[in-house]
Amino acid sequence: MQDFKLGAVESRFADLIWLHAPITTSELVKLCAQELSWKRTTTYTVLKRLCERGLFQTQDSVVTPLLSRTEFYARQSEQFVEQSFDGSLPAFLAAFTTRKRLSPEEISEIRRMIDACEKE
Amino acid sequence: MTELFLSFVNRSITAGWMILPVLCLRWCLRNFRSKDLICILWGLVGLRLALPFSLPTPFSLIPSAQTIPTDIMYAASPAIDTGLSTLNQTVNPMLSASFSPDPSASANPLQIWLALAVLIWVIGIALFALYALISLLRLRHRLTEAVPVGENVWVCDHIASPFLLGLMHPRIYLPSSLDPQTAASVIAHEHAHLARHDPIWKAVGFVLLALYWFHPLVWVAYILFCRDMELACDARATRDFSPAERKTYAEALLACSLPHAVRSFCPLAFGEIGVKSRIRALLQGKKPSHFLVVVTIFIIAILAVCFLTDPVPSDPSESSTSALALTDDVISDAILTHYNAHSTEDLLCTESHIPLLTTYRQNDDGSLKVTAYLMVLYLELVRDGDWFREQSGSHIPTALTFHVQSDGSCTLTEYWEPGDGSLYAPDIRAKFPADIAERALDTQRYIDEQMKACYDQAIAYWGLEEP
């Protein structure tokens, strides 16, 4: 479960499921054949792999997500900050802003988010 | 099967003679931007290796088209013809001494060695085939999750570098982690491969390598051919690029080069082969003048004629044809003449000779001095009732020396036998080469075989039935 990285092709597959969930496995197979040119066995293999990683689950031939897309990418960024900045979000932001300046809209949005956190 | 193997060995030796000047020419042309001419050269080498026949012309620079005679197993004194007489004279006496068939032994040692060599050769080919098959299957397994993203271009998570795969309809495979700029350069390069039909040439090269794996120069040729193929594709892909575009392409090359061992076999991978020389060629290569190109094409044509054709066989200075004129019959005649043999209806004068060693020396006038060291049994058999008996005979080591002319005529110049009594052993040790002198003294070793040979002749002569 602990690896929240997905290859580019796997992300496309995951996005298909998030977009169409809940979806039966046979419909998923047809969808993948159409969008990705995948064979039936390939779709099953990758689905099984992602289920083992805790992203989706298959029950009675219906695929449902265990994590929503936003949740998944949130955990992915958490993991990234953890691995690259020792979990320090300020350090990440500092690194992020050394090369790119924040626009005024971004600054006010972040301010609003900080205020929202404080209130909790 | 042995003949097939020997024909492959001979072809590889001729190709080896060709690969050396190709390597020289390649080094001379190393600054040319276009590597297409060099690839043509490698194509010619491949032709030499692939074709089982060739035209004999007087322009051929190949020393010898058939270094190892395909019937060498059956020769009384095995000899090879490398086309260089000094090499022949060094190697052939050793071969005759080690490999002359010994009738007292049950099997010809040369046959055994050759059979072993053929087995090893076939095992090598099988290993190549197995390696190719397994690599291909593993790659195909990894590519099951590939997704098409454009015309003939596919993307896959599980591959580490871009490559071209497929013989009939090759596909370009890219790792999913490739950024678009790098991808553009890669695709340009792979399209150049497709335009030149490289997947086919590389497969042909691999098959030739599998068949000729025993020759080190063939490996050199294959590895350099792969490199030159990549350089040619780089040149073709960046032909009309500005220096800035070339720089981007070089960066793409760097981005794709990976620190793993070079797998120069199945797919045509982008970043694997000789990255340093490729980048250098991209950024520095000069376009040669038209004059130089024409001169190079001329040189290549000359090379083709000189090395794709075989030497004309009836060359008077070739020692093998002259030596082969010294047949068993010539030796038999010499022996029978020496003993004044006159066979009649009731008397058969017969001989059996076993070659121990044959030495060759080239004379100044182009003729060959051949000395045959033999164990000779001379028997006079006389008819006795419905069988025969021995009347007289002699079993003695003998050295016959012939002068063999280029037209094949043989003249006996010396018929040597050791002296009697106490002179016998010392004479033999003095006259015969050291490695066969002891065998020559051991007459018991050969007597049974030779008696049988003479008796068989008598049986045939009088039409008798064997008891």
Image: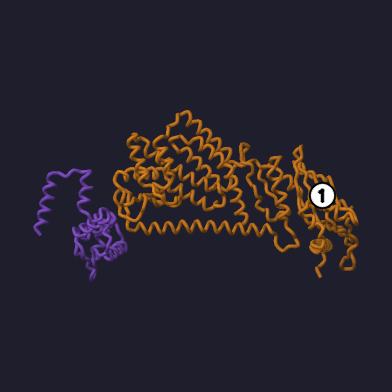
Chain colours: A purple, B orange
**Residue ranking furthest to the left:** A119
Q: Position of residue B221 (x, y in %)?
A: 52, 45
Q: Quadrant of the N terminus of chain B?
A: bottom right
Residue B324 shows in this picture? yes
Dot 1 surroundings within 10 Å: few (below 14), some, or many (20 or more)? Answer: some
Question: B57 and B294: which one is in front?
Answer: B294
Residue B460 shows in this picture? no
Question: A55 and A118: which one is in front?
Answer: A118
Which residue is denoted by mark 1 in the rendering?
Answer: B400
| Callout 1 secondary element | strand
Question: B427 and B183: which one is in front?
Answer: B427
Dot 1 falls on which chain? B
Residue B237 relative to residue B92: left or right: left
Q: Residue at x 23, y 56 (%)?
A: A87
Q: Residue at x 46, y 34 (%)?
A: B31
Q: Position of residue A85 (x, y in %)?
A: 25, 53
Q: Position of residue B142 (x, y in %)?
A: 36, 58
Q: How many marks?
A: 1
Q: Quadrant of the C terminus of chain B?
A: bottom right
Q: Position of residue B235 (x, y in %)?
A: 40, 38
Query: Looking at the image, is B427 positioned above or below residue B249?
Result: below
Question: B381 and B400: which one is in front?
Answer: B400
Residue type of the residue flagged with mark 1: Leu
